[in-house]
Amino acid sequence: MHSFKIIGLGGTNGSGKDTVGQILAEQHGYLFISVTDLLRTEAQRRNQPVEREVLREISAEWRRELGLGVLVDKAVAQFETVKDQYQGVVMASIRNPGEADRIHEMNGTMVWVDADPQTRYDRIQRNKAERGRAEEDNKTFEQFLSEEAAEMHTPEGGDAANLNSSGVKDLSDVFIENNGADTSSLETAITQIITT
């Protein structure tokens, strides 16, 4: 049992997972850790391009070598060094059911964030430069949908270390629909998460 709260954020691309994490950090005293940024850092360390396919390959490799919950473990290890300064830790993006299981093993809460596909694509395109991902997110709507489909399901009989966001959704405890243009509805949903 941990004396701090653990929240995992899963969801579709561009749904607002990072925004939820930032609200929890700025308004509720959580440390927000992007496990995707851990993968980006590793890709850069390996002198590989920071592209979704490369990040998927690295995450699968780590899961095979270190267990399905490895990204959660890495985030919690990072949090442990500063935990006395925070109410808890929130991490995004959870994309493998083993990661959701690991959060539940630590008595954490899994949150699934979603929105309409066109709304999500438009958000990504509007914010890609601000997020420092202009090249990574420079995709057509069709490419965006295709990449998302590849991340949603592990093929039947496929490698359990691969991404399976649909499996994460099935294991989520709380669901947030984020089609709005402002953060007020997100803030209300987040307040409900942390008070339960």
Image (spheres, rainbow, N blue to C red):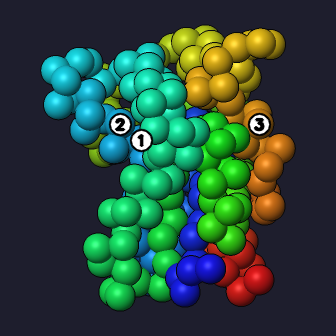
Instruction: Give the answer, above or below, for where 131 lies relative to 145.
Output: below
Position of residue 179 in the picture relative to residue 85 (left or right): right
The foreground one among 93 and 106 is 106
Q: Amino acid at mark 3?
A: Gly
In terms of secondary structure, where does tag 3 sit? Answer: helix
Mark 3 and mark 1 in contact? Answer it, CB < 8 Å.
Answer: no
Residue 118 percent coordinates (x, y):
66, 30
Q: Which residue is mark 3?
A: 167
Mark positioned earlier in the residue sequence (3 or 1): 1
Could you tell me which residue is drawn at 55 percent across and 62 percent down?
20
Q: Is residue 112 above or below residue 96?
A: below
| Disc number placed over residue 137 in the picture, else none | none
**Kind of residue indicated by mark 1:** Thr
The amino acid beneath tag 2 is Leu
Per the rendering, the mark at residue 36 is 1
For the residues marked 3 and 1, what is the alpha-carbon distance in whole angstroms? 18 Å
Q: Is residue 20 left or right of residue 105?
A: left
Read off the residue under disc 2: 39
Labels in figure, total: 3
